[in-house]
Image: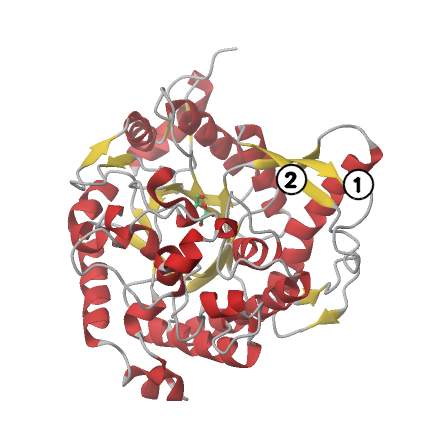
Amino acid sequence: MLLLTLLSCTKDDGFLAFPADFRFGTATAGFQVEAGCDGCDDPNSDWYQWVTDPDIVSDGTTFNSGDSLDLGPAHYDLYEEDFARAAEMGDLFRFSFEWSRLFPDGEAEQATSVEELAQYVDADGLAYYHDYLAAMKGAGIEPVATVNHYTLPLWVHDGKECREGDGVCVASGWLDEDRIIPLITLFSQYLAREFGGDISMWLTLNEPLAVIVSGYLFPSADRTNPPGLQKPELAMDVAWNMARAHAQMAEAIRAEDADAEVGIVVNLGVAYPESQEVDDIRAAEHLDYVYNEAILEMFLNGNFDSDLDGIVDETDPSVAGKTDWLGLNYYFAFEVAGFPRPIFSDYEYLDFFPKTLDSDVVYLGQAIDMTAEWGLPIWITENGVANPGPDDGTGYVEPALRTVRAKAEEHDVRGYMFWSLIDNYEWNHGMGMTFGLYEVDVETKERTLRATGETYKQIIADHGFVETPEG
Ligand code: BGC
């Protein structure tokens, strides 16, 4: 601590220190890291179905890589050694629970209280998560727990049936508010009761926009989530259901776990027009509204603009004030082109097309500024670089962290978690997109530290930057 205090004081000598209590770590998600070893697959989730079902995989409009889950990094078996690696990259580790590992079949739906739900838990799944959290603690790292990072149990969401039924299906996941909101709220309460002793930093949902946009609005080669439909009216239902679920989940967690701090992960869309043409300028403003203001108004304040025309149509006062902190995931900004008319005539502001993705760190700074406008403490819950090129990503991580450090002087930015510790199964891209500080050999599962990892470690050890950048 004394060393940190001294470092913070050396700014005048050219040393740029992070705030003394600023924390670092790495981020992962269950489905993306677990598979790749014998008996490690979890066949009971919608994402397992989405990347293994031959009909779904061979359907070109799901943009599925078809990569076998056997190529995954096998963290399910190798978590202890991974935690030793994570402990060299700060003292936070973000992971997510897989609902279907704890409640693999629909029997759990009979439960009406957390006590009843406990009777249906899968004993192996339960033991696994207790061991997992104990190992994390043993390695000296603190968990940051995401309750739901996209995956739903098949009994809650059958993405194939919903796709084939064009949104009409029995297990319709986020479309069925009467089912999913109480189910995921009870599940959250269960997690907080069972694991609250080991966890104080909680996140309800990861990037609702990814579920809404890639699942129900514009599935694309960049990302497609089950059920991969293009139905704005369903997308809006899903958004509103997720917003109300988030608030109830947060409340349920806090009720069980007295020291819980509950946040949500957002990926705000920094947008700029492709040209100075009127249509492009308007489109960038509309993307900004839809991806940022409309979403955060929904999730933080319970204000719902159901037809995306800039006017709130419905308010649920029980949503407001339920969020303790914001997790920001940042990867890129959008260069936006405009359409002369809305793509869907009933949704006036859906007249934009994110043409190019730009990962310049200047937009990371803007994303932090935008997040700060909502007045909550900020943690960067994901940031990283895909497919690091010849410089191995070192050219990204340092400028990114310089930006974060500068922003931590202006706003309440408390920590940074790099995505990701290890290469992982990148949703519809499979192992074809790599983000790890450690490269993973898909056959042997051997992990090799990348230069990015060395750089990140050094920045953490220095708690800042020894030299100011040139120029
Ligand atoms: C998600 C991660 C994903 C990362 C890189 C975020 O959208 O939370 O699961 O791997 O971006 O694409």
Note whether 321 is above or below 13 in the view shown.
below
Dot 2 surroundings within 10 Å: few (below 14), some, or many (20 or more)? some
Q: Is mark 1 on a helix, strand or loop?
A: helix
- Compare marks 2 and 1 and give the one earlier in the sequence: 1
Q: How far apart are marks 2 and 1 (CA)?
A: 13 Å
Q: Of the residues shown, which amino acid type is indicated by label 2? A: Pro
Q: Residue 101, located in which quarter of the rendered image? A: bottom left
Q: Nearer the viewer, residue 67 or 135?
A: 67
Relative to 5, 401 lies left or right: right
For residue 341, say whether it is visible: yes
Note whether 353 is above or below 394 in the view shown.
below
Relative to 383, 116 lies left or right: left
Q: Residue 443, located in which quarter of the rendered image? A: top left
| Residue located farthest toward the top when viewing the structure as drawn | 471
Q: What label does residue 417 carry, if any?
A: none
Which residue is tagged 2?
354
Which residue is tagged 1?
282
Q: Residue at x 50, y 78 (%)?
A: 170
- Residue 216 image offset from top left, x and y in percent: 58, 59
Q: Which of 115 and 388 is in front in this view?
A: 388
Question: On the rendered image, what quadrant is the N terminus found in?
Answer: top left
Q: Residue 287, located in which quarter of the rendered image? A: top right
For residue 196, say whether it is visible: no
Q: Which of 306 and 132 is in front in this view?
A: 306
